[in-house]
Image: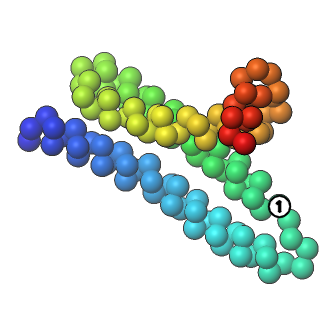
């Protein structure tokens, strides 16, 4: 198998592995929101889903970091670069949820939240 084909296979494998928990969370959120609407006294189900999303994204970010370190140590730089789009994709939601959950209003979080609104 050529290097480009091998890199593409690794990219799609990471995409599949990382999309399964997010799709599962989506369906869980839909079921939770539907059950919440049918209750006599609805609760804040969205906050629990946001916490779950934050922890799932953090776990996947840590997993990608470990995989990148392993690939760099094995000198598989082209495969390690396939993690870069996922790092960039996960960084913004993690930072946004951290700023919302962390109650921090210092320079970075204040600027970050103002730029998204």
Indicate left or right for 33 with 104 as reference: left
Image point (74%, 34%), residue name: 114
Image point (55%, 34%), residue name: 91
Residue 101 visible in the shown view: yes
Q: Secondary structure at mark 1?
A: loop
Q: Position of residue 25 (x, y in %)?
A: 58, 59
Circle 1 is placed at which residue position?
A: 44
Q: Is residue 16 above or below residue 29?
A: above
Residue 63 visible in the shown view: no
Colour setup of the view: rainbow
Q: Quadrant of residue 57?
A: top right
Around disc 1, counting alpha carbons within 10 Å, would you say few (fewer than 14), some (14 to 19), or many (20 or more)?
few
Q: Position of residue 2 (x, y in %)?
A: 9, 38
Q: Is residue 9 above or below residue 31?
A: above
Q: Position of residue 23 (x, y in %)?
A: 51, 61
Q: Is residue 109 above or below residue 33?
A: above
Image point (13%, 34%), residue name: 3
Q: Among all residues in the image, which is located at the extreme left?
A: 1
Indicate left or right for 77 with 18 as reference: left
78 and 107: which one is in front?
Answer: 107
Q: Quadrant of residue 37?
A: bottom right
Q: Quadrant of residue 100?
A: top right
Quadrant that contains the C terminus: top right
Quadrant that contains the N terminus: top left
Q: Position of residue 16 (x, y in %)?
A: 37, 53
Image point (65%, 44%), residue name: 54
Q: Is residue 46 above or below residue 87?
A: below
Q: How many marks?
A: 1
């Amino acid at each position: 198998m050529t290097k480009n084909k091998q890199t593409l296979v690794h990219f799609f494998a990471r995409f599949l592995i990382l999309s399964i928990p997010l799709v599962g969370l989506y369906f869980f959120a839909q079921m939770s929101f539907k059950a919440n609407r049918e209750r006599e006294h609805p609760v804040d189900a969205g906050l629990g889903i946001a916490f779950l999303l934050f922890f799932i994204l953090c776990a996947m970010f840590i997993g990608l970091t470990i995989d990148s370190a392993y690939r760099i140590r094995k000198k598989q730089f082209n495969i390690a670069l396939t993690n870069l789009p996922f790092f960039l994709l996960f960084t913004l939601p993690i930072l946004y949820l951290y700023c919302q959950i962390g109650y921090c209003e210092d320079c970075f979080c204040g600027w970050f939240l103002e730029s998204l609104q």
